[in-house]
C-alpha cells in the first residue's frame, strides 16, 4: 500500500493508539513512502530490473530490521507505545530540550548570515 510521507505519520500514530506495535508502525513509515509506483518505475527505467530488485529488497530488509530493533528497545525499556504517543517531548529532560533549541537557533542564524554574505558576494560580482 502506498501512502505519502506527509500522511503516513498521523496514520502510524493512530495505528499505535489502536494497538499496533511500534516496530510495525516504523515498517509502515519506511516502506510506504519508499514504494510508490513512480519511484519503482523510475528505478526500473533508469537502471534495470536487477537494480529494482535490489532496491526493493533493501527496503524490505532494512525496514524489518529497524522494526525489530525498535520493538526490542521498547521491550528492553518497558515502554508502552500507546501510552506515550503525542508525549515524546516529555521523555527528553528539559535541559536537553533547551540546549537543542538554543543550538538550532544558533545554526539558523548562522545559516542566514552565510546566505546573506553569499548573496552580497554574488551581487557584487555581476
Image (spheres, rainbow, N blue to C red):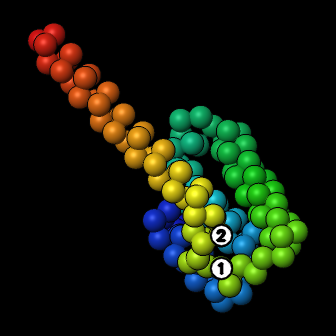
* Contact (Cβ within 8 Å) of mark 2 with mark 1: yes
* Residue 115 quadrant: top left
Q: Which residue is mark 1?
A: 84
| Residue 108 percent location from the top left of the image | 37, 42
Disc 2 element: helix
How busy is the neighbourhood of tag 1: few (under 14 within 10 Å), some, or many (20 plus)? some
Name the element at disc 1: helix
Give the class, few, some or many, for how many residues have Cα within 10 Å of label 2's Cα (few <14, many ≥20): few
- In the image, residue 26 lies at what x, y percent? 68, 66
Between 84 and 46, the residue placed more toward the observer is 84
Residue 105 badge: none
Residue 64 in view of the camera:
no
Relative to the observer, which residue lies in front, 125 or 65? 125
Residue 93 vs residue 59, the one in the foreground: 93
Q: Residue at x 56, y 78 (%)?
A: 86
Residue 62 position (above or below residue 23): above
Q: Nearer the viewer, residue 67 or 57?
A: 67
Above-or-below relation of 4 to 114: below
Residue 33 location (% of width, % of height) = 55, 60
**Nearer the observer, disc 2 or disc 1?**
2
Q: Identify the residue position indicated by label 2 in the image.
A: 91
Q: How many marks?
A: 2
Residue 11 shows in the view: yes
Q: Residue at x 57, y 64 (%)?
A: 94
Quadrant in which the C terminus is drawn? top left
Q: In percent of the image, x 26 and y 22: which residue is there?
A: 118
Rendered residue at 70%/52% (across/down): 59
Dot placed on the residue nearer the N-terminal end, 2 or 1 = 1
Amino acid at each position: 500500500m502506498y501512502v505519502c510521507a506527509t500522511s503516513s505519520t498521523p496514520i502510524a500514530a493512530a495505528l499505535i493508539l489502536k494497538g499496533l506495535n511500534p516496530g510495525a508502525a516504523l515498517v509502515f513509515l519506511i516502506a510506504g513512502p519508499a514504494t510508490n509506483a513512480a519511484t519503482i518505475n523510475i528505478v526500473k527505467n533508469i537502471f534495470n530490473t536487477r537494480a529494482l530488485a535490489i532496491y526493493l529488497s533493501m527496503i524490505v530488509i532494512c525496514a524489518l530490521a529497524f522494526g525489530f530493533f525498535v520493538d526490542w528497545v521498547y521491550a528492553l525499556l518497558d515502554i508502552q507505545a500507546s501510552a506515550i504517543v503525542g508525549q515524546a517531548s516529555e521523555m527528553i529532560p528539559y535541559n536537553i530540550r533547551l540546549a537543542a533549541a538554543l543550538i538550532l537557533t544558533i545554526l539558523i542564524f548562522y545559516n542566514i548570515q552565510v546566505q546573506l554574505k553569499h548573496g552580497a558576494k554574488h551581487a557584487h560580482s555581476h
